[in-house]
Image: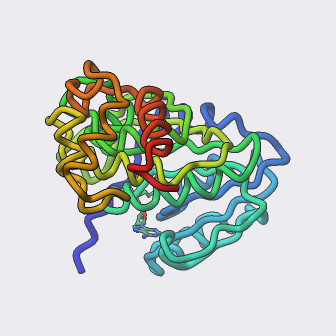
Amino acid sequence: MRNTQVFLKDKNIMAKIVNAAKLEKTDVVLEIGSGDGRLTKEIAPHVKTVYAIERDINLLDASKMALDGLTNIIFVHGDALEVDFAPEVNKIISNLPYAISSPITTKIVYFLNKRPDSFAVLMYQKEFGERMIAIPGIRDYSMLSIFTQYTSEIEKVVNVNKKCFRPMPAVDSVVIKLTPKHMDFDDGFLSFCRLIFQHKKKNLYSAIIDSRAKLAISSKEELRKRLLKIEQYELKKKVFFFEVSELISIYNIMLKIGICQR
Ligand code: SAM
């Protein structure tokens, strides 16, 4: 298989990633996709332990040789989507393999949410990062925006020009800091949003009616009756204009009137 991975060559961007991670001697860091170890080398001297997960055995072997003098690195050969993250990890840093951006973000958020004071500093393809931070009413506002904004505080660390990588990719990147809100996520809320965001350009009323096959009430008539409990102006508003906090309020009403279940 052709290796399409790109490597960060810009030292200034590496320094910005390391600074954003506010590394401390007590930290146990997980680096996803450690590659040839170029970023691992900048992290390891400042922390207690680094778990470096890399799927490509040749790169992992090369990094073991290059980082020979650093004794606090635990090399893990495997797919980051499959391997269990070590429970003592409190920070995750990664120049992510973009092909797994979506599932790995979900895994990271659920993992760190259970660990107080934890966060992640992650490099994404720029378009992906923009969808994470998108605000209501713009095209990029999507289920990805809802998921990240509901579960995490999001901060843009730095935009990264494609010239900072070798080989040079086709697209620019962005480094994002994700701090999970350390709360009990309501998966029912996320499922509800997933349903209505399939109709994100419709108004809330139509989106709910069109999602009825997967709601607790599937009769159109019954739904119509129960939706009278929701304000008219909200029902007329297009789905992708709602902020996360507004969607939570609507979901809570939907629970009360039996249209959704936890
Ligand atoms: N850390 C290096 C850097 O900063 O330049 C390499 C980053 S490169 C964008 C992504 C790395 O992730 C590659 O080394 C690739 O082999 C590895 N990778 C790709 N898919 C992976 C997966 N599912 N699990 C673990 N590593 C993966």
Q: Position of residue 4 (x, y in %)?
A: 26, 65
Left or right, 183 with reference to 24: left
Task: Residue lying at the far top in this picture: please name it.
Answer: 233
Closer to us: 173 or 99: 99
- Number of numbered discs on residues: 0
- Can residue 260 be seen from the camera position used here? yes
Toward the right, the furthest residue is 26
The answer to whether 84 appears left or right of 173 in the picture is: right
- The image shows residue 17, relative to residue 89, as above or below, that is above
Please state the horizontal and vertical placement of residue 24, each as a whole percent of the image.
79, 40
Split into quadrants, the picture shows ligand 1 in the one at bottom left
Residue at point 44%, 49% (across, down): 258
Q: Image height check: is 134 above or below 162?
A: above
Q: Nearer the viewer, residue 254 or 100?
A: 254
Q: How is the image coloured?
A: rainbow
- In the displayed structure, does residue 232 sit left or right of residue 119? left
Quarter holding the N terminus is: bottom left
Identify the residue at image location x=23%, y=53%: 211
Q: Residue at x 50, y 32 (%)?
A: 154
**Residue 237: image x %, image y %?**
22, 24
Residue 75, percent from left and from top: 64, 72
Q: Nearer the viewer, residue 238 or 9?
A: 238
Quarter where residue 241 is shown:
top left
The image shows residue 157, relative to residue 127, as above or below, that is above
Residue at 46% across / 53% down in the picture? Answer: 105
> Can residue 163 be seen here?
no
Q: Is residue 215 above or below residue 116?
A: below
